[in-house]
C-alpha cells in the first residue's frame, strides 16, 4: 500500500497489485508442495477447472492454459495482460491496461509507462522515452486486448426511455469512450481527498465533509461516488430536498446507477413525494427487483393501499436472495393494519434469518421489534431491543427517541436525560436535534423542546424543521 501513492488496490496496475501468489488445492493433494515460477493469469483458472472435471470447453477464445501445464519447468513464459476500469467507472479517470513481457512491464495510460523489472523491481523509473525499441512493439502488442469501455450494467431501450422521460440523459462510460480522461497518476491526490471526505462523513463532521465534497465535484463532476456521498451528507444535515437534487445530478452523470435510483426513491418517500418515489423504484425493477418491489411496497403503504403494498412486498420476498428486508416491510404493513402480533411474527422471522446467516447488522430490525413490543406492553423486552439498535447504530436517532419515551413513562427521568445527551454527543446533526425536540414535545416538556430546538439552530440556523420547532 502507498508504494505509488495509492492507499488501496484497484486504481493502478503496478506489480504490488498484480504479482500475487495463487494457491491451488487438487483432489487427494496431488502435486502438494510444488511451485511454478512462470507467471500466470486469472484466465488460466477456467481451463484448469475444465481439465480437472473432464469438461469440454465451449470454445477457445484466448491462449489460456491449464495451470498444471505450468508446473513444467520448461513451460514458456507468456505475455501477461491486466486491466482496470475502476478509475473510469468511479472517478471519470482513464482506464489502465498493462502488458508484462519478460523483464519489461508496459502500462498503457494517457502518460505511458515502461519499466525494467530486473533493474527496477519497484517500478520507480519510467524508461519509455529512453527505450523506444521496447516501447513501440509492446504498445502495438497490447492493442489486441483493448476493448471499448462498457458500463457494468446495461439499460434496455424501454428503461432508457423511462430515464429520458425523467430527465436523465447524461453521459455514461459507454458514450464517452473517445473522451480524453485524466491519467490516474496525475489525480491520485484527489483519491486521497475522496477518502478524507468519506472519513469526515463517517465521523459525523458533515459540514466539513460537504465543503470538501463540493470542491471535489467542482473539479470533476464525473466522480459518481461523490454524488452519492453528497446526497448522504445532505440527508444527515436534514436537507432532504437538496439530497434528492444531488442524487439526481449523479444519475444524470450515470443513468444506470441503481444505487442513486434507490437513493432518490427512498428520499422521496421521506419527503412525501410518492409519485417520484414510485418512478425511481420502477426504474430499478429489472436491475434489482427485490429492493425495487420492497420500495414500491412502502410507496403503496403510504398511499393507504395495503393490498397493493402486500403484493409488492411478497414480490420482493420471492425475488430477494436474502428476504430479511422484505420480512421487515411485511412486518411494518401488519403494524400499520393494527395487527401487532402479526407484525412481531414477521420481525421475529427476520431476526431468526439474520441469526442463521450470522449477519446481525440489519438496520432498524431491533428498533422495529422494540416498537411493537412496547405497544404490546412488553416493556423490558422493548428496552433491550432499543438498546441493541443503539449499540449497532449509535448515530441514528429513532431508537433513542423511542427509548426516551419508554424510560420517561417508567419515571426513569435521569436515564432518559443521559440518553438525550449521548445522542447529541455522537451525532450532533439536525435530525438528532429535531428528534430530541419532538420527543420532549410529545412528553409535554415544551420548555425542553424549545431549548433543544434553539441549541440545534445555533449550529444549523437554516434548518427548516428546527426553525418550525423553535416557533412552537
Image (tube, helix red, strand yellow):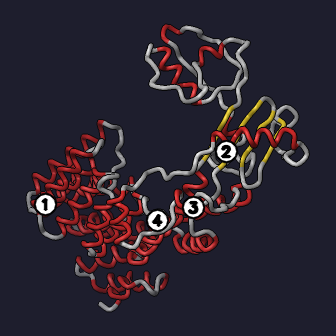
Give the label, 3 or 4, closer to the camera.
Answer: 3
Residue matched to label 3: 176
Viewer-side residue, 191 vs 356: 191
Residue 425 seen in the figure:
no
For residue 97, which numbered disc appears in the image?
2
Alpha-carbon span between mark 2 and mark 3:
18 Å
Contact flag, marks 3 and 1 (Cβ < 8 Å): no
Q: Going from the N terminus, do you reach mark 2 or mark 4 first?
A: 2
Q: Which residue sits at x=57%, y=74%?
A: 214
Alpha-carbon span between mark 1 and mark 2:
50 Å
Residue matched to label 4: 426
Viewer-side residue, 213 vs 386: 213
Furthest-right residue in this view: 130
Q: Which residue sits at x=68%, y=17%?
A: 36
Q: Going from the N terminus, do you reach mark 3 or mark 4 first?
A: 3
Q: Going from the N terminus, do you reach mark 1 or mark 4 first?
A: 1
Residue 122 seen in the figure:
yes
> As drawn, is 364 to the left or to the right of 190?
left
Q: Is the residue 19 above or below the residue 361 in the image?
A: above
Residue matched to label 1: 308
Q: Which residue sits at x=73%, y=52%?
A: 5
Determine the image quadrant of residue 163. bottom left
Crowd tier of the residue under label 2, counting other residues whose Cα lies within 10 Å: few below 14, some 14–19, many 20 or above: many
Please count the marks in the image.
4
> As drawn, is 213 to the left or to the right of 426?
right
Q: Going from the N terminus, do you reach mark 2 or mark 3 first?
A: 2
Alpha-carbon span between mark 2 and mark 4:
44 Å
Contact flag, marks 2 and 3 (Cβ < 8 Å): no
Q: Is the residue 50 above or below the residue 307 in the image?
A: above
Q: Secondary structure at mark 1?
A: helix
Amino acid at each position: 500500500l502507498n508504494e505509488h501513492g495509492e492507499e488501496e488496490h484497484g486504481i493502478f496496475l503496478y506489480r504490488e497489485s498484480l504479482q500475487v501468489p495463487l494457491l491451488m488445492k487438487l483432489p487427494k493433494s496431488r502435486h502438494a508442495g510444488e511451485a511454478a515460477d512462470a507467471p500466470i493469469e486469472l484466465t488460466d483458472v477456467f481451463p484448469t477447472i475444465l481439465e480437472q472435471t473432464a469438461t469440454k470447453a465451449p470454445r477457445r477464445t484466448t491462449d489460456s492454459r491449464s495451470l498444471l501445464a505450468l508446473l513444467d519447468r520448461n513451460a514458456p513464459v507468456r505475455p501477461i495482460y491486466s486491466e482496470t476500469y475502476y478509475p473510469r467507472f468511479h472517478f471519470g479517470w482513464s482506464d489502465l491496461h498493462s502488458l508484462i513481457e519478460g523483464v519489461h512491464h508496459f502500462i498503457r495510460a494517457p502518460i505511458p509507462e515502461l519499466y525494467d523489472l530486473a533493474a527496477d523491481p519497484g517500478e520507480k523509473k519510467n524508461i519509455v522515452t529512453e527505450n523506444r525499441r521496447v516501447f513501440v512493439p509492446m504498445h502495438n502488442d497490447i492493442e489486441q486486448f483493448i476493448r471499448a469501455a462498457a458500463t457494468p450494467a446495461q439499460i434496455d431501450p424501454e428503461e432508457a426511455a423511462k430515464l429520458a422521460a425523467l430527465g436523465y440523459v447524461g453521459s455514461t462510460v459507454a458514450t464517452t469512450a473517445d473522451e480524453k480522461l485524466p491519467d490516474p497518476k496525475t489525480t491520485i491526490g484527489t483519491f486521497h481527498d475522496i477518502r478524507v471526505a468519506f472519513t469526515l462523513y463517517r465521523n459525523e463532521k458533515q459540514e466539513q465533509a460537504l465543503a470538501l465534497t463540493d470542491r471535489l465535484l467542482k473539479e470533476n463532476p464525473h466522480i459518481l461516488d461523490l454524488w452519492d456521498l453528497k446526497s448522504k451528507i445532505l440527508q444527515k444535515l436534514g436537507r432532504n430536498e437538496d439530497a434528492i437534487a444531488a442524487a439526481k445530478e449523479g444519475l444524470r452523470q450515470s443513468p444506470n446507477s441503481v444505487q442513486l435510483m434507490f437513493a432518490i426513491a427512498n428520499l422521496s418517500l421521506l419527503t412525501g413525494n410518492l409519485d417520484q418515489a414510485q418512478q425511481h423504484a420502477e426504474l430499478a425493477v429489472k436491475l434489482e427487483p427485490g429492493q425495487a418491489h420492497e420500495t414500491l411496497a412502502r410507496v403503496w403503504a403510504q398511499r393507504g393501499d395495503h393490498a397493493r403494498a402486500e403484493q409488492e412486498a411478497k414480490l420482493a420476498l420471492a425475488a430477494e436472495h436474502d428476504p430479511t428486508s422484505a420480512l421487515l416491510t411485511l412486518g411494518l404493513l401488519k403494524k400499520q393494519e393494527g395487527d401487532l402480533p402479526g407484525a412481531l411474527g414477521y420481525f421475529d422471522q427476520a431476526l431468526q434469518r439474520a441469526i442463521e446467516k450470522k449477519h446481525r447488522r440489519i438496520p432498524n430490525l431491533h428498533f422495529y421489534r422494540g416498537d411493537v413490543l412496547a405497544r404490546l406492553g412488553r416493556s423490558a423486552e422493548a428496552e433491550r431491543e432499543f438498546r441493541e439498535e443503539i449499540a449497532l447504530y449509535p448515530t441514528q436517532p429513532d431508537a433513542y427517541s423511542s427509548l426516551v419515551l419508554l424510560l420517561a413513562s417508567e419515571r426513569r427521568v435521569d436515564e432518559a436525560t443521559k440518553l438525550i445527551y449521548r445522542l447529541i454527543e455522537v451525532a450532533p446533526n439536525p435530525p438528532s436535534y429535531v428528534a430530541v425536540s419532538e420527543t420532549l414535545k410529545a412528553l409535554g416538556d415544551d420548555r425542553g423542546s424549545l431549548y433543544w430546538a434553539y441549541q440545534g439552530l445555533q449550529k444549523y440556523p437554516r434548518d427548516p424543521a428546527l426553525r418550525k420547532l423553535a416557533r412552537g
